[in-house]
Amino acid sequence: MAQNQNLVTGRVVDPQNKPLELVNIKVVETNQYAITYKSGIFRINGFEVNNILTLEFSYIGYQKLRVPVTVKAGETNLGNIGLKVLDLSLENIEINAKRNYSGQTNSSLVINRDIIEQTPALSVNDLLNQIPNRKVTAPSLQSVQNVNLRAAYAPTTDGKGAFELNNAFGIAIIMDGNTISNNANMQSYNPGRSLGVGNSFVEGSYTSLRGSRSPTLNGNPLTTYSGDYTFGGTDLRQIPADNIESIEVIAGVAPAKYGDLTDGAIIIERQAGRSPAYVRMQLRDNATSYGFSKGFELNPKLGAINIGVNYVNSFQDNRDKLKAYRRVNTNAMWSNSFGKKRQLRNTFSLDYGRNLDGIKQDADDPVSTKTRFDSWNFNVANRSNYRIENGFLKNIGLNIRYAEGHQVSYEEQLVNDAYVLYSTATTTGIHEGTYDSGVYTAKSLIDGRPITASALLDFTGGFSTGQLAHNLSFGASFSYSANKGLGQTINPNEPRSGTKIISTSLGASSSERYYDFSLALAQKDLGFYFEDVFTTKLLGKPLNVRAGIRSDLQNGYASISPRTNLNYEVNKNLRFGLAYGLSYKAPGLAQRYPGPTFYEIPLLNSYNGKVNESTYLLYVERYVPTNENLRPSKSESLELSAQIKIDKFNLSISAFSKKSRDGITTVRNLQSLELPNYTATINPGAKPTIVQNGTKPYPINYSYFKNDLSSNNLGFEVIVNSPEIEAIKTSFNLSGGIFKTTYGSTTNTLSSNVPNTIPTDINYAYIGVYLPRANKSYYSNGRVTSVTHIPKLSLIVSFIAEFDILNKNITSADARIPIGYYNRLNQYTTIENFDRDNKLYGHLYQTPQELSETDLPRIVANYHFNIAKEIKKRFKFAFNVYNVFSHQPYYITPSGTYKYPNNLPTFGAELSIKL
């Protein structure tokens, strides 16, 4: 027991050598927390001899400090530990994120408060521009912000490709120790309709002033917009950046503590505790932002409370203000320590946010549509840590969170037809439909009320085996997701475009009905983990080990996930790392319970202009997917890394291989049904006489969810930091990389490729069937950042030269040649030997242009500029321009499309005040 009486002590002071009270101290390896007394002194008990620990000191308004400690027998006194006030007069302020094994994993990229205060940001997404091999984007809130890590999928025009959504869905967003889950989000039309997930989002049409360029995504002009983010990750627009203390981006193998992920984690820690008032105002060409935060000490016994308010108002185009996004966030965090030795630390938080997003109806355009994506969310969370100073256990932690929200997706369409045919039937069979006026406003409302709850119970213990000190972490996690919304409140009496029967052609259509989201069973996932963190010697050099295992039960499937991060310190200038791990992501409620799909096939329309003398017969097919066999997505990661220091240059390299399997998307199912064929005889003053004349085949299409996607991702990332050139007070940062992603599906690909004039031959090919598509995509981006920092003037100037080096997408040649086809009745024919001159199916051959193969023809550069000046350590003025030289190169794709890789110049000014 005596070995557990060893303690670490010290005294924390400010630059004037005055003691700092209530400084937060975290022991990284054991997850223990402590704070300083009024004298600035701290005492942490119960460590094993020779244990190598990292103490992290943080205090709002001061630069975070990490101190390595090797525990000695008895007392290890660190003496005075000085914290520096965080302002531009500091000599060593950080502007660029580094990857130097200071985080929880080898791949951790840590973005500290130094960087956050110098980065123009409207949301947390803007801070992620620090990630290597990621294109720098200007602050904007005009599109959903999902993040992808370590993947190079072919760019899509809406950011909602199946692979993009799966990657984003597999990235865990963890704030203050609790996961922000998107599992309960069900905001979409029925994805079982014939075109699946890609056609299930509520969308509005962009309208822009004459002469203005349409907004772009991935170099592609946007024509439609959706503010929903179902099937993907949490929309990062909802998280303001003002009160964030640090962000850790884990793109590789995450610690065993974190579950329900496949592609990494973004760990956000917010400010809590006493702090000066901080006011931050931004004025951009397309947005204004106002933020305020302040930490109050109630009294020594009641602790401190930190409050924050943020408001943003932004437009796609300030001249017409049709497309707008508004956000307000408020939060309060109460933190306190209890007990004689302040062993129990507790942080309680309340958050409320409201988002107003959408496209207004253009008063000058009578046929324009109106679209809204509004929401509010409220959550309450608590994080407790109890420090134990004797025995095996070192710390007991409990994180709990409850969140509730309300989401509204709304669309209006003006319909002007002679008449409309519809049915309200909800059972499979032949029904009589209804005639009604074809002039109406089709209103679609998706009402979601997601509820999520999570709990994480974490134990940290320690023991020694000889000279080796082990820091164990083990515990359990539970998550709950439900949706109590009204659901898809669709009125089949007023069908929207794409779901209504066309009276002139009587083509079959996948229709819509009301679907109550509260019918979906709540999702309950359970996980357990165990992890050991220790440092041993290999050839006399330190080998740092984080090895663990995790088990999850998700959607009835059990999984085992071993995870290991090793790094070997050859000397102070050379370190190597190796990481390997498995991880799993559970399907969300929208994938488990998409609701019944309805398909309508008109059989007879005997209409003479008088409803009482007319009859409309149709066949309704009701398909209810169970999706009980939907498995969690899976990823397997292997990573090699190195850190090399040469003459004050710091080089970080990471090479990785990530195999993603069982990605979830919708797959089309085409069938042919034999149904009655009717004829009708008009009877004046009465219903027509209907006679069945045999049967004939009809096509029917729907989609269902399946574990159909797989990808192999290879790549490397590099970050180089130079020392400051004293003569010009300038340092340089170089970051970049190259990714290669081979991806495809396990199901055959279906594609319709028919001419404008379609032959009447019943055997003419309508839909081609191709081998599962296998794509290869390459992406490489690099940038050089110069930072001129003059502490005596409290001035900092940064300039970024960014280069898109490679952006290429290739489709396998086999995917261009059909192996079979469906005719207009969904009857399948196999093609044994493809003949491009065949009049029935020759048109199904797909050229590389039709498969959207792309290749960036040359390196494309872009340039960004930022300048900031601080006055009396209280006032800071900043000005920034993205695409400062208005560099607008373009190229023409093989299909004749113009692409503009660089966005138009955008600028912003900022004023921040510390009181």
Image (cartoon, grey):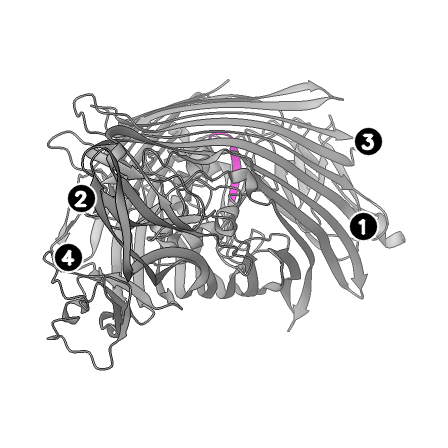
Badge 1 amino acid: Leu
Prevailing SS of the magenta stretch? strand
Determine contact: label 1, label 2, CB under 8 Å: no
Instruction: Say how many tags the image has.
Output: 4
| Inter-mark Cα distance, 3 to 4 | 68 Å
Location of residue 113 with respect to 696 vertically, above or below: above
Query: Badge 3: how crowded within 10 Å, few (<14), some, or many (20+)?
Result: few
Residue 24: percent from left, percent from top: 66, 35
> Badge 4 is on which residue?
893
Along the viewing direction, whichever of 191 and 406 lies nearer the viewer: 191
Is there CB contact under 8 Å for labels 1 and 4? no
| Foreground of the two, 374 or 277 | 374
Residue identified by numbered label 3: 339
In three-dimensional space, the C-alpha distance between marks 1 and 2, rounded to whole angstroms, equals: 76 Å
- The kind of residue on which mark 4 rests is Thr
Mark 2 nearby-residue class (10 Å; few <14, some 14–19, many ≥20)? few
Q: Residue at the far right: name it.
A: 1
Measured as percent of width and height from the top left, residue 242 is found at 47, 30
Q: Which residue is mark 2?
A: 504
Number of residues whose C-alpha sits closer than 10 Å to that of mark 1, classed few (under 14), some (14–19) or many (20 or more):
some
Work out whether residue 719 or residue 749 is closer to the camera in this orientation and state it. Answer: 749
Nearer-N-terminus badge (1/2): 1
Q: Residue at x 30, y 28 (%)?
A: 908
Residue 393: image tag: 1
Residue 444 painted magenta: no
